Amino acid sequence: MKAVRYSPNSQRPQLARGIRRLERDVLRMGALVEQSFRLSHQALFARNLAAAEELPRLDKKIDRFYRQIESDCTAIMTLQSPTPQDLRCLSAFMQLVRDLERIGDYAKDLAEIAIKIFPYAPHTSLPDIEVMSRHAQAMLATSLVALADFDEAGGRGLKHLDDTVDDAYDRVYQTLAQQRDVPGVVEPIVLLALAIRCLERMADHATNIGQRVAYIVTGQRS
């Protein structure tokens, strides 16, 4: 089946330019969120605390993009009378930048977890959690490619990838919850439980972005 794609209304050049500019800003925001995710990964799994220290600065940039994009979408909706399809695009942009902003927040949370867990010896579950993190990062990248191409099929495909992260979350959580005879403090186990929850939610938000791309193109919510 041929992939379905969306293109802004070429008969309204000013409106089309505005939507294309918004799309570029959303993708720039997405690139910052990807960078934040990579840095949080390095902080947690490579024990790179310098990477963790970069997250607050990036998070402020992400938040600025979030506020600006919401404002620009509202201005276009109010002043330019967009067509129903373009209105879908604008409303979906406003929703998916919230998803991106939340992924950025979770990346910052992971960096804080990395700092707190640094004094402890690496846990045996870390390799499985690292795989989970890489998979969630790949999902974010895939969602942004789907957005860049306005690719319905690519957007909807994220739901199947999310099942892998959900399964990994359940598996690692059970391992952590059933651990017995823990020597010393339990803080590392609690921190890792929080980390896998962050990763599971990050994957959920990447899935949401894919669903919103599909909605832009088709007008149908899954």
Image (cartoon, rainbow, N blue to C red):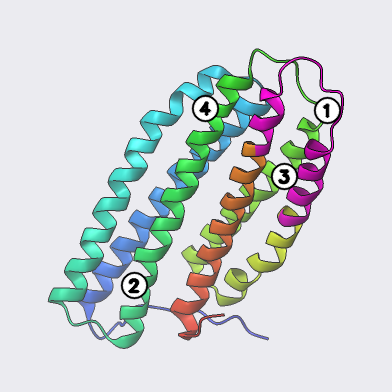
Q: Residue furthest left?
A: 79
Q: In the image, which is nearer the foreground, mark 1 or mark 3?
A: 1
- Marks 2 & 3, CB-CB < 8 Å contact: no
Residue 133 appears in the figure: yes
Dot 1 lies on which element? loop
Q: Residue 200's x, y, as percent?
A: 64, 50
Which amino acid lies under the numbered mark 1 shown in the image of this protein? Thr
Q: Name the residue beneath numbered marker 4.
A: 112
Mark 2 and mark 3: Cα distance apart in space: 31 Å
Proximity of marks 2 and 1: CB atoms separated by less than 8 Å: no
Instruction: Indicate the secondary structure of the residue bearing disc 2.
Output: helix
Question: Given the image, on which type of amino acid does mark 3 rest?
Answer: Met
* Residue carrying label 3: 132
Percent across and percent down for residue 99 are: 45, 56
Q: CA distance from mark 4 to mark 2?
A: 32 Å
Circle 4 Cα neighbour tier, 10 Å, few/some/many (<14 / 14–19 / ≥20): many
Q: Quadrant of the C terminus?
A: bottom right
Q: Amino acid at mark 2?
A: Ser
Q: Nearer the viewer, residue 210 or 162?
A: 162
| Mark toward the start of the polypeptide (4 vs 1) | 4
Q: Which residues are magenta?
A: 166-193
Mark 4 or 2, nearer chain start: 2
Which SS class for mark 3?
helix
Please identify the quarter of the rendering in which residue 157 is found: bottom right
- Residue type marked 4: Glu
Q: Residues within 10 Å of mark 2 (few under 14, many from 20)?
A: some
- Contact between marks 1 and 3 (CB within 8 A): the answer is no
Residue bearing the label numbered 1:
124
Query: Mark 3 or mark 4: which is in front?
Result: 4
Please tell me which residue is depicted at 79% across the width and 42% down the height of the picture. Answer: 172
| Sequence-earlier tag: 2 or 1 | 2
